[in-house]
Amino acid sequence: MLKAKLHQACITHAQVEYEGSLGIDVELMEAIGLYQHEKVLVSNINNGSRLETYAIAEPFGSRRIVLNGAAARCGCVGDRVIIMSFCWVDEAEVREGRYRPRVIRLDEHNEPVQRIPAAPTTDEIASMLDG
């Protein structure tokens, strides 16, 4: 199941020389429950490319989204991407409607469309897409 998603994130940097990964502002990672080194699927809205890599933390509040290594060949600064992670969920949670992924829609500056609360609850995080 979809665990977490940053919807329409904007690539801020691309570093081919770096060993690899996707750098993400740690504040955004924490808000959606994405962990350092967690596998992510990245879908580029501008060119249709998709890649799998892992997340690494960029400075808190920097709003940096950085394609590193080979991933830097899959997009350009300014491209909009969807960053997703997935997890196993108990079937009963899904059938009973108790499961909901954490999703944040971002603007062109990687600011959430809704403010991230200082210590967001699961309900606040889940509702950020609804705004």
Image (cartoon, rainbow, N blue to C red):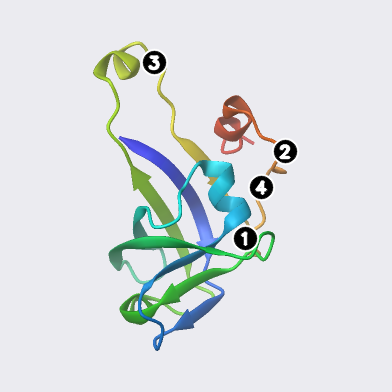
Query: Residue at 40% of width from left, 89% of height from top?
Result: 17
Query: Residue at 30% of width from left, 27% of height from top?
Result: 89
Within-10-Å neighbours for mark 3: few <14, some 14–19, many 20+: few
The residue tagged 1 is 110
Q: In the displayed orientation, state which residue is furthest to the bottom.
A: 17
Mark on residue 82?
Answer: none
The residue tagged 4 is 113
Question: Mark 1 to mark 2: distance in Å?
Answer: 16 Å
Query: Residue at 29% of width from left, 65% of height from top?
Result: 51
Element class at badge 1: loop
Indicate the quadrant where residue 99 lies.
Answer: top left
> Is there any visible trace of residue 79 in the rendered image?
yes
Percent position (x, y) of residue 39?
33, 54
Q: Is residue 84 left or right of residue 24?
A: left
Mark 2 or 4, which is nearer the eye?
A: 2
Percent position (x, y) of residue 55?
42, 60
The residue tagged 2 is 117
Proximity of marks 4 and 3: CB atoms separated by less than 8 Å: no
The residue tagged 3 is 97
Question: Mark 2 to mark 4: distance in Å?
Answer: 12 Å
Indicate the quadrant where residue 4 lies.
Answer: top left
- 39 to 89, vertically: above or below: below
Element class at badge 3: loop
